[in-house]
Image (cartoon, rainbow, N blue to C red):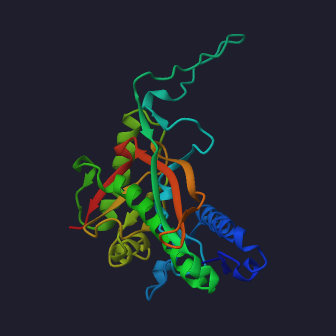
Amino acid sequence: MQLYGKKMINWKGLAAIPSGEQRAKILEAVSACFKRVAEMPLHREKMVGADPALAGTAPIVQTFTDTIDTPDRGYEVLFDEVDMTSSTSKFFEIMGVNGGVTFHQQVPGEEAKLSKLPTSAKAAVEMIRFTGGFPILDDWLTYNEHYKIDDLTADTVKRWFDQKATLFYGLLTLLDSSINQAFDSDDVTTINKACASIITTLSEAGYAVDENSSFYITCHPNLKQRIYKALAAGFLVANSNSEQIVWPIKGVISTAKIPATSYYVSLPGLKNKRGEWDVLNARPAQRNELKLGADHVWTGAYNGAIGEKLQHKRCFLA
């Protein structure tokens, strides 16, 4: 596997390392690469196609990489990160709607009135640890069969991010039917109604949101063209209608992790949280004479939650 055009492991440089230290250096190189992949910035790429009107629409959210095998990390823009890497706790808390700051008029010379943190209106999110591994056989190193290690480590990266994407998109698809937004005339009208409903219901619930808040749309790849048609519609270039999406759509997240029977309009952040405890890393190799090699275990820990389902609408197609 390559990252920014560079090999994960410098096999030519490995030859200069004593054989007894090579396994440790391999694990070190792979762990460093895993960390770099996780820290890759998300970027926005305009959709291209036969219709020039699509060029000005909201971008597809994806991970920047120079390879075709791009990890699905689009969900990251929906969830605010809670950095738990230095924490000694297996939990982080999502504070309730009443946990924010309340501002009071202050008389000159008067002390500020501090808001009270809620004692019950909060939810605890517990760390989930994931572990997997594979053996590296002695003969692979003896006979320079490095491609086998490359293949296994590349597969480990893909499966790690695939598992993570499944969990976070699953939080979205498992929301109950109360977030459903019925189809209304066309996709433009449906999306406008979804955005308006999110802002209205959140405001009524006491959240500090307004009509300038930006949204993301999450859809199956098969629906990208349809969603972009709706985003490209305008009052002047109307794509056969006189409607226009009047809410800020910051981007479109395309993933096969959700069904193609509907799409989601979401207000990012706020009570959408993802805790990161431990980036995927290698444990010390365990010698296994039965395999004439060493077992290599990889582990990492994370979890997340949607603390307020009012931030999301599931929009239907007809």
In the image, residue 119 sits, relative to residue 287, either above or below, namely above
Q: Residue at x 51, y 29 (%)?
A: 100
Residue 263 location in percent, x, y? 32, 63
In terms of depth relative to the viewer, which is nearer, 191 or 175?
A: 175
In terms of depth relative to the viewer, which is nearer, 84 or 65?
A: 84
Which image quadrant for residue 87? Answer: top right
Q: Residue at x 40, y 54 (%)?
A: 266
Indicate left or right for 255 with 110 as reference.
Answer: left
Residue that extends furthest to the front in the rendered view of this protein: 289
In the image, residue 225 sits, relative to residue 127, either above or below, namely below
Evaluate whether residue 209 shows in this view.
yes
Residue that extends furthest to the top in the rendered view of this protein: 109
In terms of depth relative to the viewer, which is nearer, 260 or 8?
A: 8
Indicate left or right for 26 with 77 as reference.
Answer: right
Which image quadrant for residue 163? Answer: bottom left
In the image, residue 265 sits, relative to residue 43, either above or below, namely above
